[in-house]
Amino acid sequence: MIFSNSKAVAKMESSRQAVFLNIARAEKKYTFSICGPRGSGKTRIAQDYVRSHANAFYISFGDLSEQEAMEAFRLQYVPEASEFSDWNKAVDAFIKKRNKRSTFLIFEHENSAAMNGCEHAFDRYIYSTHYVRACYISPGEKRAWNDVSFEVSYQTLPDYFNAFPNYCRQDLIRLYALTGGILSVAKELNNQCSFEENVRRLLAYDSAFTKTLPMWLAQSFRSPESYYPIFKSIASGHHRLSEIAKEIGFPNNKCGKYLETLIRHGYVIAEKTESGKQSTYHLANSYYVSWARYAYGKSAMQVGMPDKLYEYVTDDIDSAVALPAFLSSCMRFIDRAAKDYLFEYRASKVESTQNALSIKTRDGQEVVFDLCVQTDDAMYVFVFPHSLDTRYTKAEIKNIYDALRQNRYYYNTHIIIFSIERFSDWCVHEAARNIWLHEVTLERLKY
């Protein structure tokens, strides 16, 4: 795998130091948790940690029955003991073997009788001794009762930028869009290979790119295949309920229930239209879009015509997947950078928000402001690139100035420009001089 998660491991180490080793000074802090979306690398962090710490133990039972799990626990941790009849006896034997030595337990979240019984048996020691502490790996948000938690998220564009220093920025965005930043999907990528070879690795019929989404859906639904057409429809540009239902052949009410289920499991996001009366539906990660366009229904091409599939992907990916994925990164930056000095409007009263304001300058040039936010103090306009090859130079910045002056927006207006390519030297110097002009480079999309 190309990403080592070294930062996440270091963070886990610091959390353990704070919660586990100094527990005596922290009243009632017995546990902490690692949380984050599926495929973000939580389990790998825990397993790496266990391999390097003799006092740490990773506990996971998967699909084992309670009796099978108890036997697996015995064979792994107390093989000298005979079979156990219940979890209390199994845990007692394990703790006795540890002989009051520092013991750090890492439980993989599983809603099963085996895991529930094991955790409950360990609780007697976690909450009554100073030498047994626990970490819980859980999907989504942290456990509400935990005092300390940290989140593992998907990799970002800057992570890909660091992992592939010899790639051009456009190819980095394409790889990021194909994998969605999901570590379990990106595991085929190799920074010693060419961009073409890495894309071919992903498109293979037996790759993680092809198999991960069906595997996740199978874990959540009894008939995962029923949901595939919805992914395909949304990835093809249908975002209204009526459009999706018409294409896949479901009645609106049945399609609506399927969409609600996908939203509840984090695969689909619903967004209100400007009227507020209807919603549009979007896939929550660019990998889901890529899978629906390049893997679903294409097994014959993956096996028999890989060259043709590669050509199709390279012709389609920029406008259909890569650029939208970059724009999503820009929106996440805006939404999450509330503490950044650029976004003072978070502390101001927002009077209005407008999408895609188009202005023509006197010489006929069209300037598009993709997001405009009017507050009680100032105006904020955001400019996104509309091509992977867009590069901002003096001419583009001058056009933006002219468009704002022409419409009396120039004064007291923050201009925030996102760019894939580096800004020209003139733009960098202008941003240093003009406090109202802000540049956001690819490297800054860290959120």
Image (cartoon, rainbow, N blue to C red):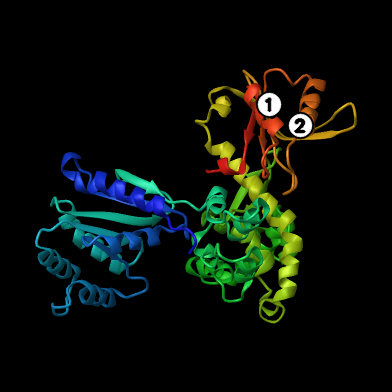
Between residue 238 and residue 27, name the one nearer to us. 27
Q: Is residue 212 above or below residue 332?
A: below
Mark 1, other Cα within 10 Å: few <14 / some 14–19 / many ≥20: some
- Total number of numbered labels? 2
Q: CA distance from mark 1 to mark 2?
A: 9 Å
Q: Is residue 181 above or below residue 333?
A: below
> Circles 1 and 2: CB distance less than 8 Å?
yes
Q: Residues within 10 Å of mark 2 (few under 14, many from 20)?
A: some
Position of residue 157 in the picture relative to residue 430 (left or right) = left
- Where residue 242 sits, quadrant-wise, is bottom right
Residue under label 2, please give it. Answer: 394
Q: Mark number for residue 430?
A: 1
Q: Does residue 219 appear in the picture of this structure?
A: yes
Residue type of the residue flagged with mark 2: Lys
Q: Quadrant of residue 417?
A: top right
| Amino acid found under the numbered disc labelled 1 | Glu
| Mark found first going from the N terminus, 1 or 2 | 2
Q: Residue at x 73, y 63 (%)?
A: 314
Residue 370 point in image, percent of width and height: 72, 37
Residue name at image x 86 percent, y 33 percent: 365
